[in-house]
Image (spheres, coloured by chain):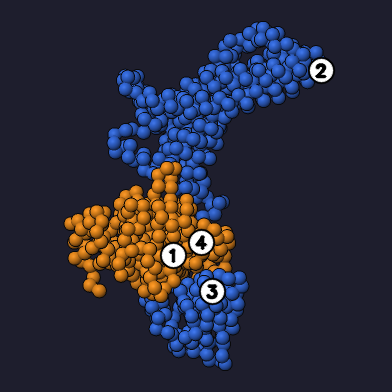
Chain colours: A blue, B orange
Amino acid sequence: MSQAASPTLHIEGTHTVRAAGHWQVGALAHGGIMQVLDAKLKSIPDIGTVHWDLSQIEALDTIGAQLLWNAWGRQRPSQLTLPPQYENFFHRLQETGRLQLKKPPKQHWYALARLKQFRLDMADHALGFIGLIGQLVLDLGRFAGDWRRGPWREISASIFHTGYQALGITALVGFLIGVVLSYLSAQQLHQFGGDIYLVNILGMSVIRELGPLLAAILVAGRSGSAITAQLGVMRVTEELDAMVVMGMQHGYRLIMPRVIALAISMPLLIVWTDAMALLGGMTAARTELGLTIKYFLRSLPDAVPLANYWIGLGKGVVFGGLIALVACHFGLRIKPNTESLGHGTTLSVVTAITIVILADAVFAIVFTNVGF
Amino acid sequence: MDCDPNQPQPGTTPIIQIEGLRTQFDDVVVHDNLNLNINQGEIVSLVGGSGTGKTVLLRHMVGLTHPAAGSVRVLGEDICTTDPRQLQRLRTRWGMLFQQGALFSALTVFDNVAQPMRELRVLPKELIREAALMKLNMAGIGPEHALKMPSDLSGGMIKRVALARALALDPELLFLDEPTAGLDPNASESFVDLIRSLHQEMRLTVVMVTHDLDTLFALSSRVAVLADKHIIAYCEPGKVVEFKHPFIESFFRGERGLRAIEAMPDE
């Protein structure tokens, strides 16, 4: 196809404007043409009273017609030469009149109404979350009463996805954190000859704090986002509605299996992460301080009372349940559009991590006198 | 004229030229040695049973997928071998209406239609606003709906907005994938009228996939029947129904088909 002739305007004398060329969006969009036309249109003195000759126009489309129409002040000029094939465009513009777009009320970020909205949103989330926990308790009761027909398949699939498939990443991160922690502590302890206390520092911090927290943050990022996105897409594709219609409750079939699965896989992941972090710490301690692995393992039970281990596992159960609940809470609230999906997933992961750290603080306060 | 798809029509240059096309998904062959020519200003309907690859063929034409063999030339360019800049230029010259609408769910109705115009980066804001509202108006959506989100629209309205978006840049070539599926008879009727008037005004070439016999008979200048992995018949709707093939017999000569043929405009 040949290059379309550019749209041009010729001002002839003081009373005739002749348009020629291709007045189509493809030609108008070529570099600089819009500016030239705009300047030309502005230079015409009496835009409504001059004679407009459109007979030289080779092709016209609705955008070209709209451009001319706007230039004419949204009315037909009194003197107009218009080839009959273009009559329809201007006829329609005249018929339709000016279409107005109702501007939505603009809200500034500092508006007081936002604060109120924020408070309402918070209350809404809190209520929703409490409702979710209540529903979970009811579902657990139903599951306990009729465990043979429970959603076993969903639970085992969830354990596989959230537990087994997370082994690699938790091992890597756990090992590296163990190495870092060991190196940093070893340097400090070495200064005042307390090399052997490395076992205490490493064992206590990893088993009681870091192992559970690391695993929980990784799982919140990994499985929490997956759960939210999965439920969100189910909302977009109306699968959630289909389930309700078929009598499959969201709580029993979607939320409870995930909460149970994470409450099972989380403590197991913590055992794994603890082991990997200690392995990393031991390796670093051997190279940095010359502590043998044998010595490390033998003094570990004396340095870290068993209660700490149980606290760590208990944290795992709680963290896992919380992550699943938060992820489901945000997943079910996603609206059927792409923006809400992205926003909801982000919010879900951020909230899950925050809540895990909050719960960790509660554990620290409640168990102050246990395990030392 | 008989219904042989391989025979080029004399005197005109085809706007779409498909030669020896072959589509294969793993070891399932969908199209084999498929030929099709579409001339400028035609309204061509693609019909065929489910799974015969009508939508896939449409996707080949707009360059979303590439055939395993053969060539697809649209507006004089080979879609598979043309350079990216040329392809980009081609893409402003056609519009496509997707089966489910495919509206941008994060944008309002108005922004959906204005987006292709903004993408050109040169049109003034006011012109875009009025042109987009005009396009919506042409598709039967008043300005009071312009600020709604796609998720708040009914199925028929989504189709209309999607059509307005497909028409945003006044394309020469319009691809419609099941334009009237899911619309009530009234809405289909006005859709058909809209396409017909646009076709007359803007010298539009339309390629549509449809199962709706009423739409097919009301609009098509030619019908291409896809069966046995290629186009088995390609001619005017009045002639295609007489073609001897089991699919055509069942598709057109069932009770529904006969009713639609009866209602066909006499030309």
Three-letter residue code for mark 4: Asp
Q: Which mark is residue A191?
A: 2
Question: Does A333 sit above or below residue A318?
Answer: below
Q: Secondary structure at mark 3?
A: loop
Q: Nearer the viewer, mark 2 or mark 4?
A: 4
- Front in this rendered view, residue B27 or A350: B27
Badge 3: chain ID: A
Q: Nearer the viewer, mark 1 or mark 2?
A: 1
The residue identified by callout 4 is B78
Marks 2 & 3 on one chain: yes
Q: Which mark is residue B16?
A: 1
Q: Secondary structure at mark 1?
A: strand
Q: Is residue A320 left or right of residue B1?
A: right
On the question of residue B112 being in view, the answer is: no
- Front in this rendered view, residue B91 or B254: B254
Question: Does B138 sit above or below residue A316?
Answer: below
Marks 1 & 2 on one chain: no
Q: Nearer the viewer, mark 2 or mark 3?
A: 3
Residue A202 pos. (x, y %): 68, 17
Badge 1: chain ID: B
Q: CA–CA distance between discs 3 and 4?
A: 16 Å
Badge 4: chain ID: B
Marks 3 & 4 on one chain: no
Q: CA–CA distance between discs 1 and 2?
A: 81 Å
Q: Which mark is residue A2?
A: 3
On the question of residue A91 being in view, the answer is: yes
Q: Is residue B143 left or right of residue B49?
A: right
Residue at 39% across / 31% down in the picture? A254
Three-letter residue code for mark 3: Ser
Residue A20 pos. (x, y %): 52, 82
Three-letter residue code for mark 2: Gln
